[in-house]
Image (cartoon, coloured by chain):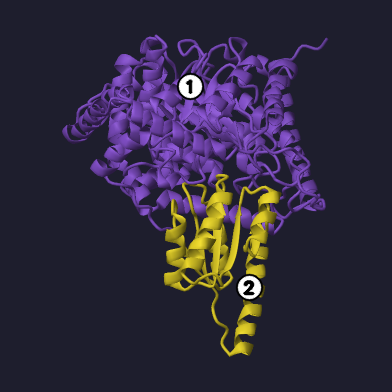
Chain colours: A yellow, B purple
Amino acid sequence: MTKRRIRVLIGKPGLDGHDRGAKTVASVLRDHGMEVIYSGLHKTPSEIAEAAAQEDVDVVGLSILSGAHMSLFPRVREELAARGKDDVLLVGGGIIPVEDMEQLEEDGFARLFGPGTNTDEIAEWIAKEMEARFEREAEEA
Amino acid sequence: MAIDTGENMTESSSTEAVRRVDAQAIWEQAMAKARLREASFTTLSGDELKPLYGPEDVADLDPERDLGHPGQFPYTRGVHPSMYRGRLWTMRQFAGFGSAAQTNERFKFLLEHGQTGLSTAFDFPTLMGYDSDDEHSLGEVGQVGVAISSLEDMSTLFDGIPMGEVSTSMTINGPAPIMLAFYIAAAERQGVDPKVLRGTVQNDILKEYQAQHAWLVSPEPALRMITDMMGYCAEHVPLWNTISISGYHIREAGSTAAQELAFTLANGMEYVRRGVAAGLDVDSFAPRLSFFFDSHLDFFEEVCKFRAARRIWARKMRDEFGAKDPRSWMVRFHTQTAGVSLTAQQPENNIVRTAFEALAAVLGGTQSLHTNSMDETLSLPTEKAVKIALRTQQIIAEETEVAHVADPLAGSYFVEAQTNRLEQEAEAYFAEVESRGGVVPCIEEGFFQREIHHSAKKYQQQVERGEKRVVGINCYVEDEAGPAIDLHRIDPAVEREQHERLADLRARRDAAKAAAELDRVRAACKDGSNLLERFIAAAHADCTLGEIAQVLREEFGQFREPSIL
């Protein structure tokens, strides 16, 4: 059985121009064999959700370092739901206080990755989560 | 007491030479046998280091030609003859958050604690030329800096601060000419003549496309606004530094020290070319150009970078651009310690990192310095953290006695060799940029962005493989117990109140006058007349930042980011 490639959208919602982390993670996920689309900078939540729907991705990873995460991350989740994409594995990262990470994880984010996270661990965690999902889907089918 | 004859001298110097050869051979043998901690030792930027540097590494160095004296060409040793004996560096902490009134309070707090200049951080909507109530601004208002949408906001920001006396730096680029217009107009409201205003507006749009990514319009019209501003300020605001050519963001985005040095100076030379092409005499504007560098953790590499920057710029300006005024040759620079070097883990360690970086900046001869606060990987800094950061500079200045001697590391074989190496790497990049058609084509094609991304990824992987070590990240790791420090949070009410203030301003102002001034901005975009003059008039008519910027976006078109992944 050929393994399905995991499709990922890395998105930069808001006006924050800090894209070092987003680009590095995108590039590492690609090294791990995933198909990665990068949104580019300065995107609105609806633009990111629209791209996720059109590209039919399995994973959406968001990055914000401007402090706007509590406004924009939930907005992306709502916009995804509005397009029937609330089943994606939703993750995020950036300069995000621990309390906010916990809140976002309660509100439907699968996981938040803070500063100092090993990028290979991000890739391995996503791969493991998605494998479990693919297996469940196969069983259900 | 024996007196040396000529014969004895010959004999003793040849013995000396033999002894040196022996010493070298003995040392090499010992090194061949020694057990070393690592297979290779490199700078933070990844350049291989020798275990020892000696005279042979600086054989070509001509101290008179390559170093000079402080205050003399090529300024390798500093731009002032007396360096810090005359005046210490300016301690300038970057600050800004929430509303103009809140940042005004922080400014006054810093001035009361001995800070000697102001430095303004703006929020992302302001940096991108959007009003606080624009749909793009959702969630961003007041977060990473202060929200300034109008002349009224600017007047509130400087309320009770004498604008004729304080020197102010404003970190803004795309809309920099508009923000400077607000500043000039606010000073005029305080009754201050723009001729006495002192400060800097960052206004370095080229590095925005390369690294920091807060732009307003595409490169060519952005460069036109910059030459408009250089022309206007030379005449009307003569003490103002019109561009702070910045390597900081290039480095923070992941570049190496050599890339930071090379790209920054390449951008600087591009501004000079543009000014000259617009018909300005190089010596009419070049003395008002200043620079802004990062100070990272590789202590010696950073000191050498600052020294190399001064030498390269002096040579380029005198020998290639024909500048005659020595002030045009000088790199005067601000430094900020490296935000990217801080860790969210064990955040108190950041105080120590920042202190080393600050020391490198001082030994490298900086004119002003911002020291980061320990909590900045978690949120904006608290007052307590900011005060420790400022005290770090004060301890260097008052307690360590390092500021008494100019360029104290000069003459070290290692320091001079590494200064030369950085200059050579920068020259290689200048040649490559030129061969690719120049700075703007390189931006449009993504050359700088790709180089920076590759360096960033390489470093990240070195850390993850343990080749580069970071305390708290891949060594001396402690169990995560969450940060034991307080966080500074922005009240969401700031965004709402800023919306209300703008609605009120739009209702109160003379609408016909505001509309007429916006039309005159549009006309100036088309006919090529000086835009800064128009922005000042629009500011006085209470046109908002977003309204003026929208005219520019419509007339000049927006920048499309090249894909580099």
Residue sitting at x 81%, y 12%: B2
Observer able to see residue B530: yes
The answer to whether tags 1 and 2 share a subunit is: no
> Rounded to the nearest whole Å, what is the CA distance between mark 1 and mark 2?
52 Å
Give percent across and percent down for residue B287: 39, 20
SS under mark 1: helix
Q: Dot 2: few (<14), some (14–19), or many (≥20) neighbours within 10 Å?
A: some
Q: Looking at the figure, which quarter contains the N terminus of chain A?
A: bottom right
Pick the front one: B537 or B202: B537
Disc 2 residue type? Ala
Observer able to see residue B59: no
Residue B192 as seen in the image, left or right of residue B230: right
Quarter-of-image position of residue B541: top left
Q: Which mark is residue A127?
A: 2
Q: Looking at the figure, which quarter contains the C terminus of chain A?
A: bottom right
Pick the front one: B356 or B169: B169
Disc 1 residue type? Thr
Residue sitting at x 44%, y 20%: B155
Give percent across and percent down for residue A87: 56, 72
SS under mark 2: helix
Give percent across and percent down for residue B311: 48, 28
Residue that mark 1 sits on = B156
* B536, above or below B188, in the image: below
Q: Chain for mark 2?
A: A
Residue sitting at x 37%, y 46%: B433
Q: Nearer the viewer, mark 1 or mark 2?
A: 1
Pick the front one: B530 or B435: B530
Q: Dot 1: few (<14), some (14–19), or many (≥20) neighbours within 10 Å?
A: some
